[in-house]
Image: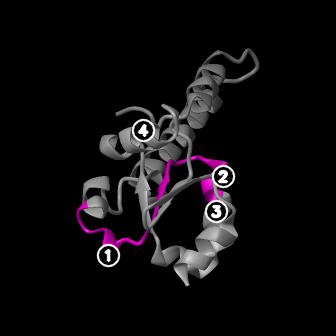
Amino acid sequence: MTRWVPPSAIVLGVLALTWPGLTAGQATSFVAVLAGLGIAWWVSPLNGRSGPRHADVMADPSAHPVVIYWRPGCIFCTRLRGALGRATRRASWVSIWADREAAAWVRSVNGGDETVPTVRIGDEVHTNPDPEIVRAALR
């Protein structure tokens, strides 16, 4: 799956190689930095490759009362994570980019859109909810 490669990184790489004022050494250094950042992202827990899977949280809902479906790079997901503070650890975070079943489920409850964060609290589903709703459910 190549969704994790931000298009801006590709554009910056092409610009670095074709920018008229850059020397070959500067362009090579710039591309090396971009490659390093890409590798760091690939191994980072923030890219969504760690954590529970959709099948796991659906198999045992009592063990996962609050499930937050998210994707890397989503500013609304970042806002929710920040607003929850320490309570964020009590929720189950499922990346829709790392789990095709999760992405399909999110589309099924959002009219075909992969809108995140989508939060399942018990049997209720909230799309981009107010953080206070999620915080109250995590208490």
Q: As rendered, which of 4 and 75 lies closer to the eye?
A: 75
Q: Residues within 10 Å of mark 1 (few under 14, many from 20)?
A: few
Where in the figure is residue 86, as x and y percent of width and height? 58, 81
Q: Nearer the viewer, mark 2 or mark 1?
A: 1
Q: Which quadrant of the view contains residue 131? A: bottom right
Q: Are marks 2 and 3 in contact (CB under 8 Å)?
A: yes
Disc on res. 63 = 1
> Which of disc 1 and disc 4 is earlier in sequence?
1
Disc on res. 108 = 4
> Which of disc 2 and disc 4 is earlier in sequence?
2
Where in the figure is residue 22, as x and y percent of width and height? 71, 23
Determine the residue positioned at 39% across, 54% down: 43
SS state under label 2: helix
Determine the residue positioned at 58% across, 46% down: 73
What stretch of residues is rendered in magenta? 59-78
Residue 62 shown in magenta: yes
Q: Amino acid at mark 1?
A: Ala
Determine the residue positioned at 55% across, 76% down: 137
Determine the residue positioned at 64% across, 31% down: 26
SS state under label 4: helix
Q: How far apart, in angstroms, are the residues tagged by discs 2 and 3?
A: 6 Å
Disc on res. 83 = none
Q: How far apart, in angstroms, are the residues tagged by discs 3 and 1?
A: 21 Å
